[in-house]
Image (cartoon, helix red, strand yellow):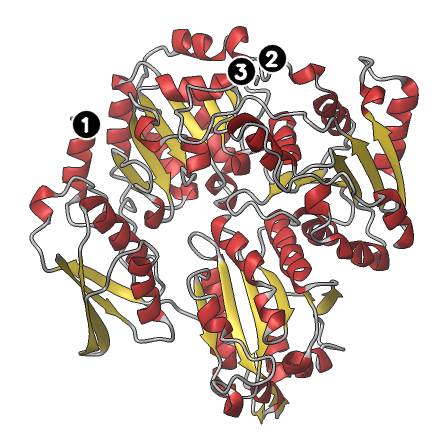
Amino acid sequence: MLKGADIVLQCLRAEGVDLVFGYPGGAIMPLYDALDGSGVRHILTRHEQGAVFAAEGYARVTGKVGVAMATSGPGATNLVTGIADAKMDSVPLVCITGQVRSALIGTDAFQETDVFGVTLSLTKWSRLVRNIDEIPDVIAEGFHWARSGRPGPVVIDIPTDMLKAKKEFSGPSEFTPHARPADANADGGFTDTVVALLRQSAKPVALVGAGAKLSGAIPDLRRLLDRLSIPTFATVHGLGAVDPQAPYYLGMVGMHGTRAANMALHETDLLLVFGARLDDRVTGEPTRFAPHAKIIHFEIDPAQLDRVRPCDLPVIGNLADTIPAFEAELQRHSLPDFGGWRAAACGPERAELDPRGLAQPTIRFLDELFSRLPEGSVILADVGQHQMWAAQRYRSSSPRGFITSGGLGSMGFALPAAVGVQLARPDACVLCVSGDGGFQMNIQELATVHRLGLPIKMVIIDNKYLGMVRQWQQLFYQRNYAETDLSDNPDFVEIAKAYKIHGFRMNEDAMREFPVSPETGDQIDRFLRSPKPELLVFDCAPEANVFPMVPAGAPLSEMMLEE
Amino acid sequence: MQLFHIRYRNTQGTLMRILNAASRRGLELPAVQAAAAERDHQVTLALDVNQKQTGQLYREWYSIADVIHVGSGAAHTAAWVSHHPPAGVTLEDSRAAARA
């Protein structure tokens, strides 16, 4: 006879889980009581939101399912932002929440929340366990849905009496999904149409999103792009999927994308989309998005098609299947010479990132940091201006080397996510770039970093504003900086010191020389190579802006390059 | 007004997910009828939707784990412009339209 809590942990082990992130509380105490000796290591964060973001970081860098645990009521509701984040960014995540005992459900008992109902629209699948016998099946099915197709979040809510009850346990279950409509392109019959459209095209382009990484199709994709050699760009989650040295690569596309990428997307007559949702940050004004183009959308999740603009040819399926089929068809055909178009789209006058870019000390600082990172490093960016600067300057070909909250844009994501990343990749240099606003949203996780001795390199770009909001206020609200002033920020170095973490400041003066002085270079190198956690606070000009910028509601061709 | 018939396994939350796909778009739900249908369940919804919303709803309903089939009682197929399966026209039609 085993308790429900022991069964949960054995089923987690059967799913390959050896690490979970969480925060204990009343209803989930039986599960915590059973942790010792279970083979599942638990990481105590200092807030449930820290736990779910850490689980996301773990999942994003490994591709495995991340697991977060919390108690009922406020514990569960504190997971909600992370669940929504995982839904938007296709992150495989299982959240296990304790619930009040079965007899009290629906009575507004102490710490009772209908977490099943609260998270229904945010999850890919969820269950409230009603009987201890269900536990093995529910966990098997939950993990299946979290990792299958377009990955996403799952919630399993377990009343505390189910965790305490005992039953004979015959072993973990295996889940077999019921029959679903077949993938529309499972027959590979789309390939001749794609090739025909390419042969008709004069200005084809390729847009790469997160799906390229999630599918594991990066080698296939890169080989295909090399063969096509057409102007190519990436969404923020597609960064690293394409070799940035490729002569046809134009960088990031969208609201803060490169001028070259946005102009090529505006002018193209054939857009090949590989695993991207085409959300509004990528498309700009939808009715003026790629106005001359036919769109071929390679996508695993049919629900992502036609959200902003109908595509002309859907190719539904896993990129790991559809790209090789496409490439095989290509080998039997010759394509027009796209050299002239490629040269025009990738020309030096187009490829320039930001006319003021390298003159801006913060961008120079990020360039210095990134260029000194060891091979295999992972960069996490929080949300805001620093996120877009970091994305613009990311130049690695590591597919899982740049991690950020892209879809939901959750401030406070990066620090706890870095905890998950560093635990998954203990030998990697993990660089966590935050703003002064976002860092304070989960600043308590410095305690987790300290307790675990994680050598995370934390950078705060401190402009003493909620910088991205302030930028919009400057550009679109007549400089009415309503409630974005953070000039009374605490001393972050002293805060780090209170958590027994070394910190220091650097200001823009250090970046005025090019190349930077040997002293500054040494300081950055020591920071990056320290075996301990470190905090670097970079004092940024308060009114530095992110350019290029496509104003909300404008087409991609109408970028602002300066105020 | 258009009628949609969605067949699903009657697991926890599946009906709510089906309804939520409509309500999150601000659509009124003037008529909803759900009942057992052979071994499964079926819900019939009356919705006032345009073609783009219809396509989105079809695909979102199909992405719900326990949805088995989505059908429509209205003869919208002939005027269908958003031609992505699973939605009402054949792949051959879809490919021909793309080449046109």
Q: Which residue is mark 3?
A: A247
* Chain of the residue that carries numbered disc 1 in the rendered image: B
- Measuring from the top left, give residue A553's x and y in whole percent: 40, 30
* Identity, as a three-letter code, of the amino acid under mark 2: Pro
What SS does tag 3 mark?
Answer: loop
Discs 2 and 3 lie in a common subunit: yes
Q: Quadrant of residue A207?
A: top left
> In this orientation, does residue B86 appear?
no
Residue depicted at x 30% and y 22%: A198
**A552 w.r.t. B75: above or below:** above
What SS does tag 2 mark?
Answer: loop
* Identity, as a three-letter code, of the amino acid under mark 1: Arg
* Chain of the residue that carries numbered disc 3 in the rendered image: A
Q: Are marks 2 and 3 in contact (CB under 8 Å)?
A: no
Q: CA distance from mark 3 to mark 1?
A: 29 Å
Q: Is residue B85 left or right of residue A543?
A: left
The image quadrant where one finds the N terminus of chain A is bottom right
**A145 w.r.t. A224: above or below:** below
Discs 2 and 1 lie in a common subunit: no
Residue count near mark 2 (Cα–Cα under 10 Å), binned few <14, some 14–19, many ≥20: few
A148 or A402, which lies in front?
A: A402
Q: Is residue A81 left or right of residue B86?
A: right
Q: CA distance from mark 2 to mark 3?
A: 21 Å
Q: Is residue A23 left or right of residue A158?
A: right
Q: Which residue is mark 1?
A: B99
The image quadrant where one finds the C terminus of chain A is top right
Q: CA distance from mark 2 to mark 1?
A: 40 Å
* Identity, as a three-letter code, of the amino acid under mark 3: Pro
Q: Which residue is mark 2?
A: A355
